[in-house]
Amino acid sequence: MSDFSREWLALREPADADARADDLLIPLRAHLGARDLVIRDLGSGTGSMARWLSPRLLTPHRWVLTDRDPDLLAHAAVPGAVTDLRDLTSLTPEDLSGTALVTGSALLDLLTAEEVTGLAELCVKAGCPALFALSVVGRVELDPPDPLDEAVTSAFNAHQRRTVDGRALLGPDAVPVLSRVFEDLGATVHRCPSPWRLGPDHPELTTAWLQGWLGAACEQDEELADVAGSYLRRRLTGPLRATVHHEDLLAIPA
């Protein structure tokens, strides 16, 4: 199952909704006030951020869903939303004119330091707050533990930080890097944990996540492939609970 397929996004959406940091909505709503809002969601997929945030906002608003995948945008289910097919790195300050909020989910770890710096500079120049949710932080807790957990976690984190087509991905370093950039630009930054809690309540997602997590680790460290099959069988045989740590970030320009 692709990380960006409609099936995977639909499967993870309930766990995402449970994990998102409600505490960040307090300073966000205070900043936004009572005006009508235009919100631009980056890497929007089919619109899960909009479906989660819309009922939690207290003012009228409309969404601009930005993604480079036409199939995902074609299946976006957000009433009244405008879709914008493009790579987020092509955005300009003019594109954010009239925008009250920029959002994104499970996005930052796929970017480079240069790209997140440009994104922060864009938001600050436009005077636009930014809410980025569900960024991986490189920590996974599995119950019961297994001797291979640490090796798989290390290989997965290295895979997240790999270089793709000359782009050095930030992976678990994304939130700290973006936080420092926003603070250097004078913005106020709020950060909150947003962990997935997987297990019997999400059996299909737990299995799919485990397979994808292990697969990425094996891609990074080929020596793990020799033991991956037995590790996966052990994990899928008994009851498994997993806490997959993420972090949400809200930046409010001065």
Image: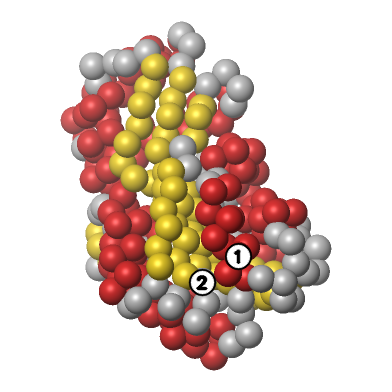
Direction bottom: furthest residue:
94
Q: Which quadrant would the C terminus be assigned to in this image? A: bottom left
Mark 2 and mark 1 lie on one chain; the one further toward the N terminus is: 1
**Residue found at x 46% / y 16%:** 240
Q: Which quadrant of the structure image shows residue 176?
A: bottom left
Instruction: Indicate the position of residue 107 as horizontal and vertical percent values.
Output: 45, 58
Up/down of 11 relative to 76, above or below: above
Which residue is depicted at the point 47% across and 42% down? Answer: 194
At numbered mark 1, what does the secondary structure look like: helix, strand or loop? helix
Q: What residue type is labelled 1?
A: Ala
x, y percentage for residue 140?
35, 32
Q: Describe the element under mark 2 as helix, strand or loop.
A: loop
**Residue type marked 2:** Pro
Identify the residue position indicated by label 2 in the image. Answer: 129
Label 1 neighbourhood size at 10 Å, few (<14), some (14-19), many (20+)? few
Where's residue 144, x and y in %? 37, 13
Residue at position x 28%, y 33% in the image: 153
Q: Can residue 68 be seen in this view?
A: no
Q: Left or right? Give the position of 204 relative to 191.
A: right
Q: Is residue 106 left or right of residue 28?
A: left
Residue 53 in view in this figure: yes
Direction top: furthest residue: 238
Q: How is the image coloured?
A: secondary structure
**Quadrant of the rendered structure where residue 122 is?**
bottom left
Pair 2/1: label in front: 1
The picture quadrant where one finds residue 19 is top right
Q: In this view, does 78 lie above or below 116?
A: above
x and y, in percent, of residue 33 in the image: 66, 71
Mark-to-mark CA distance, 2 and 1: 12 Å
Disc 1 designates what residue?
30
Crowding near the residue tagged with mark 2, few <14, some 14–19, many ≥20 C-alpha atoms within 10 Å: many
Residue sitting nearer the eye, 25 or 79: 25
